[in-house]
């Protein structure tokens, strides 16, 4: 789509498609929420483009991000994942995906769904920011600080405040599209 204004980071693929179709769109499907939590954790220390380029590898390796399946991965399966070039082969990140799936299932059992739990951090509706430039884009917020602390108490790993804030952006819990971006008013 030429002639439209996007957020500065969405200038090339796969970022453009991700920006135009997903980023900032409110997500309420538990499996997709688990996928985004996993991918945001995998991104720690890397670029988001690196993760987007491996997204299909992650979907294949983690069997469509079904948390009940991933939660049962034993040491043998985790060792096999460490040989998979389609994902980031970091032992701590692979192990955390499995333990996060287990914690995810516990949240579902306690709250009915992960969606019901996680969206309570924003009172069930997106926080809409009015950013004029990318320099105003925060890395964390009071909400992401609280979310990080609570998720860690529940046994989640790779859920620092910055990762939680990125998760909130990705899943539409916060709308950080620039006000000049065509997506700001659409999500």
Image (cartoon, rainbow, N blue to C red):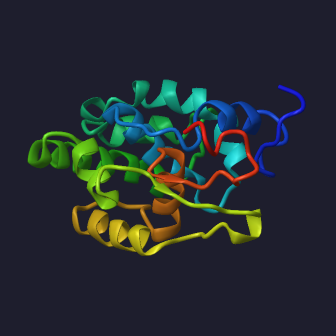
The one nearer the camera, 146 or 185, is 185
Where 34 falls versus 163 (above or below)? above
Kindly indicate the quadrant of the structure image that contains residue 17: top right
Question: Which residue corresponds to the image point at 44% horizontal and 38% vertical from the top-left?
Answer: 35
Side of 160 relative to 16 (left or right):
left
Question: Which residue corresponds to the image point at 53% horizontal and 46% vertical from the top-left?
Answer: 170
The quadrant of the picture occupied by the C terminus is: top right
Side of 15 relative to 5 (left or right):
left
The quadrant of the picture occupied by the N terminus is: top right
- Residue 111: % across, % down: 13, 47
Question: Which residue corresponds to the image point at 53% horizontal and 33% vertical from the top-left?
Answer: 58
Where 11 falls versus 141 (above or below)? above
In this view, the residue farthest toward the left is 110
Kindly indicate the quadrant of the structure image that contains residue 76: top left
Whether residue 19 is visible, yes or no, is yes
The one nearer the camera, 156 or 120, is 120
Question: Which residue corresponds to the image point at 42% horizontal and 37% vertical from the top-left?
Answer: 27
In this view, the residue farthest toward the right is 3
- Residue 11: % across, % down: 84, 42
Side of 57 relative to 144 (left or right):
right
- Residue 114: % across, % down: 25, 44
- Tally of numbered discs: 0
- Residue 30: % across, % down: 31, 35
Whether residue 91 is visible, yes or no, is no
């Amino acid at each position: 789509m030429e002639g439209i204004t996007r957020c500065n980071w969405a200038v090339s693929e796969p970022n453009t498609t991700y920006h135009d179709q997903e980023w900032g769109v409110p997500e309420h499907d538990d499996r997709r929420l688990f996928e985004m939590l996993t991918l945001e954790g995998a991104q720690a220390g890397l670029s988001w483009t690196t993760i987007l380029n491996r997204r299909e590898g992650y979907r294949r390796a983690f069997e469509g991000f079904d948390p009940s399946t991933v939660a049962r991965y034993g040491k043998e399966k985790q060792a096999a994942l460490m040989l998979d070039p389609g994902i980031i082969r970091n032992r701590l990140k692979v192990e955390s995906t499995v333990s996060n799936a287990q914690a995810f299932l516990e949240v579902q059992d306690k709250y009915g769904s992960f969606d019901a739990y996680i969206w309570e951090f924003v009172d069930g509706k997106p926080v809409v920011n009015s950013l004029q430039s990318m320099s105003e884009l925060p890395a964390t917020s009071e909400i992401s600080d609280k979310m990080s602390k609570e998720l860690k108490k529940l046994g989640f790993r790779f859920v620092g405040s910055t990762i939680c804030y990125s998760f909130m952006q990705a899943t539409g819990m916060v709308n950080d599209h620039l006000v000049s971006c065509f997506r700001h008013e659409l999500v």
